[in-house]
Amino acid sequence: MQKDFPTLDRFDRSIVKVLAEDGRISVADLARKIGLSKSPTQARLKRLEADGIITGYRAMLDPIRLGLDHVAFVEVRLADTREKALAEFNAAVRKVAEIEQAHMIASNFDYLLKIRTGSMSEYRAVLAEKVSSLPHVASTSTFVAMEAVKETGMLGALNSAG
């Protein structure tokens, strides 16, 4: 079933791109950057928020300066992959603060988790006490990141879309 998403024109795409780079920009400055006056820019901004394209605004934090420089990617295999089990796993994952990302994967494992902690010992505790006790977990495999080469979010996709 195809989802019905709003169509974005070049001004909408420009608004989203600018806000992805600077969420604190004033409406007046945003309007100048995209080449519209303030009123239509503000109306477009409200529509993008109402349509759920812009879901919120937040500060971008440097995890390394916050002492959270240990990143592990964890393959998770579930013992049960029926819809009820997947829903239970998904709900439980959302409650674990150290899990930055969780993706269901079409592979020989079921989920790929990105977990951020301050150290290997903290990670081991998260794995043992939180990840391994998530509903329906049968096994895990850990891959520790040595360096983040690129973490830019969605800007590249915005540049190539429509």
Image: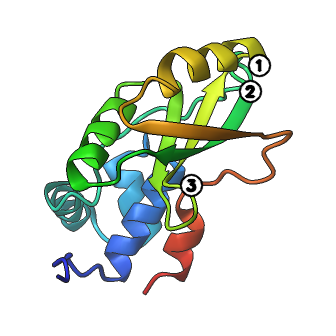
The kind of secondary structure element at disc 3 is loop
Q: Nearer the viewer, residue 1 or 124?
A: 124
Q: What is the three-letter code of the residue carrying label 2?
A: His
- Residue 28 in percent (x, y) is at 35, 53
Tag 1 residue: 120
- Position of the C terminus, as image quadrant, is bottom left
Between disc 1 and disc 2, whose residue precedes?
2
The answer to whether the residue labelled 1 contacts the one labelled 3, judged by CB atoms less than 8 Å apart, is no
Q: Nearer the viewer, residue 32 or 6?
A: 6
- Residue 155 in percent (x, y) is at 56, 63
Task: Classify mark 3: residues with Cα within 10 Å, few (<14), some (14-19) or many (20+).
Answer: few
Which residue is farthest bottom? 162
User: For residue 39, which quarter of the picture?
Assistant: bottom left
Q: Nearer the viewer, residue 75 or 62?
A: 75
Q: What is the three-letter code of the residue carrying label 1?
A: Met
Residue at left offset 49%, top offset 72%: 158
The Cα–Cα distance between marks 1 and 2, rounded to whole angstroms, is: 7 Å
Residue at left offset 38%, top offset 64%: 15
Residue at left offset 17%, top offset 82%: 1
Between disc 1 and disc 3, whose residue precedes?
1
Q: What is the three-letter code of the residue carrying label 3?
A: Gly
- Residue 106 in percent (x, y) is at 50, 67
Of the two numbered discs 3 and 2 in the rendering, the one whose residue sits closer to the viewer: 2
Tag 2 residue: 70
Residue at left offset 70%, top offset 16%: 118
Q: Residue 38 carries which label?
A: none
The answer to whether the residue labelled 1 contacts the one labelled 2, judged by CB atoms less than 8 Å apart, is yes
Tag 3 residue: 153
Task: Classify mark 2: residues with Cα within 10 Å, few (<14), some (14-19) or many (20+).
Answer: many
Above or below, 34 relative to 71: below
Between disc 3 and disc 2, whose residue precedes?
2
